[in-house]
Amino acid sequence: MKLFLLYIKQHKKGIFIWILFCLLFIISFILYRLPLKAVIYPALICLIFGVIFICIGFLNKVRKHNQIVTMKKITADMISYMPPIECIEDNDYQEVIESLKDEVLNLSASTTERYKNLMEYYTLWVHQIKIPITSMQLTLQNEDTPIFRKLSSDLSQISQYVEMVLAFMRLESDYSDYVFKKHDVGNIIKNSITRFASEFIDRKIGIEYEPIEKIIVTDEKWFSFVIDQLLSNALKYTHKGSIKIYMKDTILCIEDTGIGIASEDLSRIFEKGYTGYNGRIYKKASGIGLYLCKRICNNLEIDIYVTSELYRGTTVHINLEQNNLKND
């Protein structure tokens, strides 16, 4: 109905001119004392033909409108067909669209090339920076003094930040490097705990780990990144007490006794860049870690959610039930 009203509005000048001519003929016939039937019959015939032409024109407009709506759903590089040209404006519009299409394609190619170069640079940078980090970690692992443990902990954080940069770049890319295989969740978690061992000792934070025997289909590298990030967050916001890792049915739980999360922030903690109440207190919060975890978990076909109480602690829940992957 809206489209029909717009079509009538578009042809309102023609309709107005038809009405005006009918009135002129009627007035002329009245002034010359001629029978009105002589003008009414032609007016009715013109009206019938006008309605027919309006209906035909409207059906053509509907067909053209549907073609344009279909074009709106595809990308610029897929547009290969344009509706037939019916007037000068159609030709002008199609020339503008073709010009914009070429501009979009050139911009897309340029952006893709720049992104590819940026990815290559950061990938090279990550691998280069890992060499001195690994060297320093190997040097420090043979020492067991407070200052060496502190240095080892700081190096571990630097290494994790480097991995976050690479993970963020890869997630924003158009390609995927996921390799899904069967993996033991318990082994992945134990490896993560080992990587943070020096920080647990230095921070005097206890770790309660209930042995987990669970096999899932996942990508070990990306799943390990999620566990590392969650352990890092738990350590960052826990000043005393312990961190507990356990299974509850099919749900992996990572529970801490830290500062917790404000209730008004819980619905937004997975948003990119959102730090909330804790971010205002701890300026080092970036709001990227949990965002990356959520993105990765979605790609791994697992669900992640958080329950927390301010100043009482936080529990991250990862549902390892993978119906979609099992069906595949």
Image (spheres, helix red, strand yellow):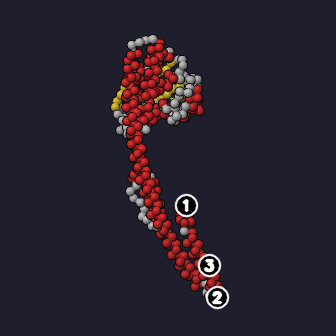
User: In front here: 77 or 25?
Assistant: 77
Amino acid type at circle 2 is: Arg
Amino acid type at circle 3 is: Leu
Disc 3 and disc 2 in contact, CB within 8 angstroms: no
Q: Earlier in the sequence, mark 1 or mark 3?
A: 1
Q: Earlier in the sequence, mark 3 or mark 2?
A: 3
Amino acid type at circle 1 is: Lys
**Residue 33: which disc?**
2
Disc 1 and disc 2 in contact, CB within 8 angstroms: no
Q: Residue at x 62, y 88 (%)?
A: 34
Q: Which corner quadrant holds the N terminus?
A: bottom right
User: In front here: 294 or 279?
Assistant: 279
Q: Residue at x 59, y 75 (%)?
A: 19
**Residue 2: which disc?**
1
Q: CA distance from mark 1 to mark 3?
A: 29 Å
In the displayed structure, would residue 191 be above or below residue 326? above
Pointer 3 residue: 23
Q: Which corner quadrant holds the C terminus?
A: top left
| Figure quadrant of residue 223 | top left
Q: Earlier in the sequence, mark 1 or mark 2?
A: 1
Q: CA distance from mark 1 to mark 2?
A: 43 Å
